[in-house]
Amino acid sequence: MPAHATLADLLAARDEDAIALRAPGRAPLVSAALVALAERTRRRLNAIGIGRGDRVAIVLPNGPEMAAAFLAVATAATTAPLNPAYREDEFAFYLEDLRAKALILAKGADSPARAAAARLEIPVLELVPGEMAGEFTLEGGALGAAAHPGPARTDDVALVLHTSGTTARPKIVPLTHGNLCASAATIAATLALSPEDACLNIMPLFHIHGLVAAVLASLHGGGAVVCTSGFDALRIFRQLDEERPTWITAVPTMYQAILARADRNADAIARAPLRFLRSSSASLPAPVMLQLEETFSCPLVESYGMTEAAHQMASNPLAGPRKPGSVGLPAGPEIAIMAEDGTLLPQGATGEVVIRGPNVTRGYENNPEANAKAFTDGWFRTGDQGVFDADGYLTLTGRLKELINRGGEKVSPLEVDNVLSAHPAVAQVLTFAAPHPKLGEEVAAAVVLREGAEVSERALREFAARSLADFKVPRRIVFVSEIPKGATGKLQRIGLAQKLAVQF
């Protein structure tokens, strides 16, 4: 099925009786009701002076109302979902940076976003849930004509998100209806999604992964989204048993937490067979992929995405060969490998991964300096280093900013991660650069051991030395109970040496 022009078109194209949104303990919301909700929301926003191009920040907990608010608001204005865990000053920064015209909060919610909005004199719209999953009404806002009323168009910005990169000031990524619909169509095709499918969404809905892969791709394919309150490793097996989804999309840290409890929940896994698992947003160690496929008796599809591409860029095929350690074949935009000077490199050469296509943002907002660095001859530079193999599969060798420069020798942290994670005692590993007085940087690693397992630092270093050149073997291995993660579950490689007080 080709991409739709707008999110409203995507919703309207569905079977009106098909279930769109589900949630534990709630009556489901069918497509016709979701379309009607979007139309009511558009009329309400237009009546209080909010229309196409106006920014509406959304601070809601994960669940069906968050998914529905994103969809409904985007048909009339520009959505800006924010992490509910932010502090007041963080909310104030993002609300001001976005030039938000309104903030949506759950009615009566005690959120620091409310105080931040008051400081900036931004009106708060109170969301009141209905009986069906995702159904809501909005209260508040002064009546006034919208400057640009009516349904959103293909080139209108539907979603703005801030990058979670390593720059001091996050950049604003605007994504149009065309960007989002193109990405949703590609993901649905990659995964062969159909009206029989239901995705158990455990990803945060202030992040591109959950919004596009779980919600939009599911709806584009005609299926449903089971909207949970977020990831809970203790609860997920009960959710599988009760909700009977056909697939899950998640980040590697979530899957590793699931695997740690899988043996105790084998009966639930057997009762609720999945069609496939999908992993994205961070590199999945090859041993973890193989263990997941064995545990759940279904394929695991590893893919590659980023906010600037409206999520998916490459994916291992569901039906074809899936290569552990590879992010697969181009699945969305065109992908090439570029040298530092802007020359496109031949197959087999290692360089920066660059993309272009209908799902790629046109550029960061109000940031000509960043755009000048990010775009070369129409190609967007991802900041990832990678290489295509003879079969056209892409393997990422690391973030350019995360490569460890050990006295002039470049070490890919991902390569070291994959070797150490193959040790039977290792549950999780993250390799990082630590400052060194002579070499500049030295290789270090943080390791979480499996429950009940024991191994010494020396034994792990010897294990790594069997597969890695000497300069790649970590000189320091720190055993920790948990590796620091960001809000979306990504492990935090940058700055880890400082957090763990590792230096040479």
Image (tube, helix red, strand yellow):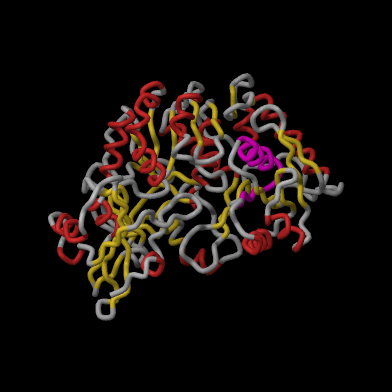
Residue drawn where x is 72% and y is 39% of the image: 151
Which quarter of the figure has residue 118?
bottom right
Q: Is residue 351 magenta?
A: no
Residues shaded magenta: 64-82
In the displayed structure, 19 sits above or below 228; it is above
Question: Is residue 117 rendered to the left or right of residue 91?
Answer: right
Which residue occupies the foreground of this view, 337 or 221?
221
Residue drawn where x is 19% and y is 56% of the image: 460
* Residue that lies at the very extreme toward the left in this rendered image: 466
Question: Is residue 204 rendered to the left or right of residue 132?
Answer: left
Which residue occupies the foreground of this view, 70 or 492?
492
In the displayed structure, 249 sits above or below 497; it is above
Residue drawn where x is 35% and y is 63% of the image: 402
* Residue that lies at the very extreme toward the top in this rendered image: 17
* Residue that lies at the very extreme toward the front in this rendered image: 452
| Number of numbered tags placed on the structure image | 0
In the displayed structure, 271 sits above or below 62; it is above
Q: Split into 4 quadrants, where in the image is the C terminus? A: bottom left
In the displayed structure, 8 sits above or below 109; it is above
Residue 220 picture location, percent across and down = 54, 31
Whether residue 504 is visible: yes
Residue drawn where x is 38% and y is 64% of the image: 496
Whether residue 385 is visible: no
Which quarter of the figure has residue 431?
bottom left
Residue 448 picture location, percent across and down = 32, 52
* Residue that lies at the very extreme toward the bottom in this rendered image: 438
Question: Is residue 483 rendered to the left or right of residue 346?
Answer: right
Residue 379 picture location, percent across and down = 43, 56
Residue 89 picture location, percent across and down = 65, 64
